[in-house]
Image (spheres, rainbow, N blue to C red):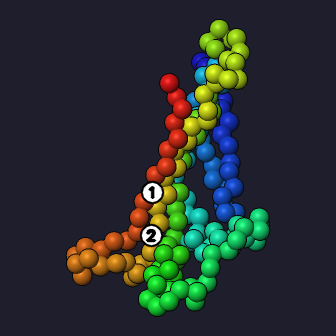
């Protein structure tokens, strides 16, 4: 009987704990480490995240809707009310040693790779109808990947 253990990581994103489960085990120096998000997590609206970044790090806040002329102020409010959800998150930290245990020179090591998928959806009743009662846009989805694997 073999028993293995593997540790994941917990990120803090807009005050929400995001647990990334380990996808790899063994000698991580030789194989690298991989982590994935086990289930989607809502992180708030663009307004919420802006307030968090501003309050926590002093980042510039989003401008007020009143700084836009009508009807752009309404469009702006609708966009910043979108509820953001991290649907996908994977992280791969490359190995620092070759299979034989020798160090991989820093100049030839691969960079950390990641994929993040975020959806943004309006609350129920705020969809954009394309065909009333039949077809509506509820939000958008964006995936960003950086891969430096061979």
Q: Where is residue 85 in the image (x, y as percent from the top left)?
A: 52, 62
Residue sitting at x 57%, y 37%: 113
How many numbered discs sit on the rendered protein?
Answer: 2
Residue sitting at x 56%, y 71%: 45
Which of the two labelled residues, at mark 1 and mark 2, occupies the earlier sequence position?
Answer: 2
For mark 1, what is the residue?
Answer: 142
Q: In this view, does 100 lie above or below 3?
A: above
Residue sitting at x 71%, y 15%: 103
**97 vs 65, nearest the viewer:** 65
- Asked if residue 135 can be seen in this view, the reply is yes
In the figure, is residue 140 to the left or right of 107? left
Q: Where is residue 140 in the image (x, y as percent from the top left)?
A: 41, 64
Q: Where is residue 47 in the image (x, y as percent from the top left)?
A: 60, 75
**142 vs 125, nearest the viewer:** 142
SS at badge 2: strand
For mark 2, what is the residue?
Answer: 121
Residue sitting at x 70%, y 71%: 60
- Asked if residue 27 can be seen in this view, the reply is no
Q: Where is residue 136 in the image (x, y as percent from the top left)?
A: 30, 74
């Amino acid at each position: 009987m073999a028993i293995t253990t593997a540790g994941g990581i917990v990120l803090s994103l807009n005050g929400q704990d995001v647990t990334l489960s380990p996808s790899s085990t063994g000698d991580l120096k030789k194989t690298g480490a991989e982590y994935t998000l086990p289930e989607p997590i809502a992180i708030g609206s663009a307004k919420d995240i802006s307030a968090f970044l501003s309050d926590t790090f002093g980042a510039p806040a989003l401008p007020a809707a009143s700084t836009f002329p009508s009807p752009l102020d309404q469009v702006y409010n609708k966009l910043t009310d979108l509820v953001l959800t991290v649907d996908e998150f994977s992280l791969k930290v490359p190995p620092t040693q070759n299979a034989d245990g020798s160090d991989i020179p820093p100049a030839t090591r691969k960079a950390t790779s990641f994929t993040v998928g975020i959806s943004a959806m309006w609350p129920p009743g705020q969809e954009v109808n394309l065909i009333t009662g039949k077809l509506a846009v509820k939000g958008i989805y964006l995936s960003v990947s950086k891969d430096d694997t061979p």
